[in-house]
Amino acid sequence: MDNLKSQVASEIAKRVKTDEIIGLGSGSTVWLAIEEIGRRIRQEKLNVSALVASKESEIVAKEQGLNVLPLASEYQAVWGFDGADEVDENLNLLKGGWGAQTKEKILARRCGSLVIIIDASKLVKNLGKTMAVPVEILPEAKSIVEPELIKLGATSCQLRSKINSLNKELFTTEYNNLLLDVAFSIPLTIKLEQQINAITGVVENGLFFNLATEVLVATQAGIKSLLPPSTTKSC
């Protein structure tokens, strides 16, 4: 699996050009790609600026010699790349395994195009197969949000705890909000994405519809490029 991640990370790094602004998502595959970009910066003397979607990505980017620009700035990225926890056959995404879904969605809308880099295990027929939907909420709104999610078809709403936390310390996002992992008994659609975000106290959720312009998939047979609506090509 790590070898597949390295393959797709190397492939996306090849696309970087000097003097351009790119968008960097978050997650282990993205961080591998940033390291590959850093190698090119050192070897080819590239000048690369970036908008980033998490503190972790910012740290890696700075270590690798990228010029990190504030996400709140007026700059736009020519293109960007990110990972995903699930990708369906229409290139819709389920994200938020790292809890950075809000910044990731902001970043996606700040990029001229968005390439998703994954291995083949992340491909699913329908979103929600392997994970629940992350829903970022204001801490004060938990008692408001949960009943409304149940009305929308949620079967469970679990507050996320920090990984390896012995005392079940709650996970908090970079905005100091809580994260609910929500399982649904209904199909995950763009309408549901909008309905979730319309609930008072919800900041954002991990459903990403119509944002990916390409998905690069690492397989044992090589890298495949998936394009909407269903066109594929080999790299």
Image (cartoon, rainbow, N blue to C red):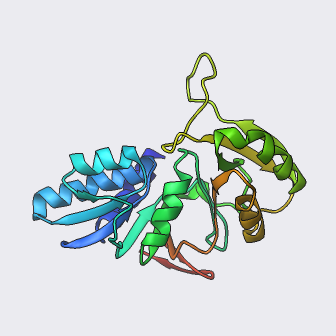
Q: Decide which of 87, 148 is in the foreground and name it.
A: 148
Q: Is residue 16 visible?
A: no
Q: Is residue 63 above or below residue 216?
A: above
Tell me if residue 6 comes above or below residue 91 in the rendering.
above
What residue is at 62 percent from the left and 54 percent from the top?
A: 203
Identity of the residue furthest to the top in this view? 166
* Residue located at (40% from left, 54% from top): 30
Q: Position of residue 78 (x, y in %)?
A: 34, 76
Residue 79 image offset from top left, x and y in percent: 38, 73
Q: Is residue 186 found left or right of 221 in the rendered image? A: right
**Relative image position of residue 199 (x, y in whole percent):** 75, 57
Q: Say which residue appears at 38% left-offset and 61% top-offset.
A: 72
- Number of callouts in the render? 0
Of 180 and 33, nearer the camera is 180
Q: Quadrant of residue 13?
A: bottom left
Q: Is residue 43 above or below residue 108?
A: above
Q: Quadrant of the C terminus?
A: bottom left
Q: Is residue 139 left or right of residue 152?
A: left
Compare residues 167 and 148 and report the one nearer the observer: 148
Residue located 74% across and 40% down the image: 142
Tell me: 223 left or right of 43.
right
Which residue is at the front of the view, 2 or 13?
13
Above or below: residue 74 compared with residue 172: below
Image coordinates for residue 155, horizontal then vertical, percent: 86, 45
| Residue 113 visible in image | yes
Q: Quadrant of residue 68?
A: bottom left
